[in-house]
Structures are given as structure tokens and as C-alpha cells.
Amino acid sequence: MTSESSRRTLLRGLALAPFLWLARSRRAESRDYSSPAEVLGTIDSLEADVAGRLDAIAATLASARPLATSFLADHARHRRVRATVRERLRLAGPPIAGPPKPAPSKGERALDGLRAAQEALVYAHAEGLPAIGDPAAVDGLARNMIDLARHLAVIDLWLEAEAARD
């Protein structure tokens, strides 16, 4: 096998990793969405939760700020995609700036809470795609889901590194 074909194989494997993770860690409780508006509203709410948790972590841990900034920039791009989906499907929705960010709950480890919130956001995308019903809209949301699954993988690596330090 040439080094070029090895690189292609590796890149294909890395591209599929988020989907393999989703299949491997599938939760028993899934949600059936009744409408695209319900899917998008849930995603908006869950994204706001993740953003609030990222802001809280970045406020207390300077080394986390670049990562939080990167993730939040992706969230802004995802909101623009959702705004386009809402236009395409003629749905009302929040402004592109997004909904207000709730404060993370007290009493839980910040990274554990971030991981749980991120996982819920990824699952909302995966479970909501069938309710969207428009191929272009599904494509945009699926691309967002891939970004979010990569974020979740980074959070998992962060948790592992923290556990190894303890």
C-alpha cells in the first residue's frame, strides 16, 4: 500500500469516527420529533446550554478559552445554517444571535456537565433529521452534527486527560 493510499484510508477512518461513536454509544431513550420546528427549537435550546457551559469553563480556566472560542464560532455558523433551514421551510425562529445562554447547574463537575450537554446536542441532531423532510436542510444539519460530534470527541479526550492527571 502506498503512503498516499494509506493517508486516504486514514482520512476516511477519521471522517467516519463521529458516526461510529454515535452508533457505539447509542442511548436507549430516543426521541421522535413531530415537526422541523420542534427539532430546531430543541437544537437551539441545547446549543444554548452547551454555550453557557463553555463560557463558564472559559471564565474560570484561561487555557480553555481558545477551545471555547473555536466551539462557539462553530455554533454561530450552525445558527446561520438553522436560519437558512427556517427560511427554506418557512418557519419562525430566534434571531441568528441565538437564544440566551442558561447558567450551568451548580454541583456537577463542569466537564462532565459539558459532555452530557454536548452529547444531548449531537443526539438532537441525529434524532431530528428524519423530521426535517427536506434534503438540503438535512444536509446542512447533518454537517453541523458532524462538527458537534467532533467537539464531543475533543471533550472526551479532555476528560480522559483530566482523569489521567488525578
Image (cartoon, grey):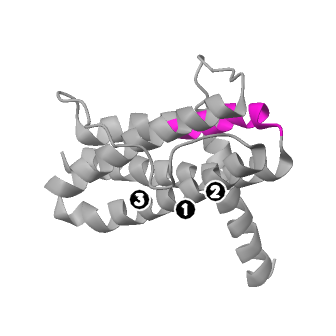
* Residue 86 x %, y %: 68, 46
Q: Which image quadrant: the C terminus?
A: top left
Q: Hey, which residue is sitting farthest top in the picture? A: 29
> Tag 3: Cα neighbours inside 10 Å, few (<14), some, or many (≥20)?
some
Residue named by callout 2: 81
Q: Give the label on residue 77, or none.
A: 1
* N-terminal-most mark, 2 or 3: 3
Check residue 102 for magenta coloring.
no
Is mark 2 in CB contact (under 8 Å) with mark 1? yes
Query: Could you tell me if residue 124 is visible in this image?
Result: yes
* N-terminal-most mark, 3 or 1: 3
Residue named by callout 3: 72
Q: Which image quadrant: the N terminus?
A: bottom right
Residue 70 shown left or right of residue 131 in the figure = left
Identity, as a three-letter code, of the amino acid under mark 1: Arg
Q: Nearer the viewer, mark 2 or mark 3?
A: 2
Residue 65 shown left or right of residue 1 in the figure = left
In three-dimensional space, the C-alpha distance between marks 3 and 1, rounded to whole angstroms, equals 9 Å
Residue 14 shown left or right of residue 102 in the figure = right
Query: SS class of the residue under badge 2?
Result: helix
- Identify the image quadrant of residue 35: top right
In three-dimensional space, the C-alpha distance between marks 2 and 3, rounded to whole angstroms, equals 14 Å
Q: Which residues are magenta?
A: 121-133
- At a point 76% along the width and 73% down the height, the residue shown is 8
> Tag 2: Cα neighbours inside 10 Å, few (<14), some, or many (≥20)?
some
Identity, as a three-letter code, of the amino acid under mark 3: Leu
Query: SS class of the residue under badge 1?
Result: helix
Identity, as a three-letter code, of the amino acid under mark 2: Val
* Residue 96 x %, y %: 51, 55
Q: Hey, which residue is sitting farthest left in the picture? A: 60
Residue 48 shown left or right of residue 24 in the figure = left
Q: Main secondary structure of the magenta part?
A: helix
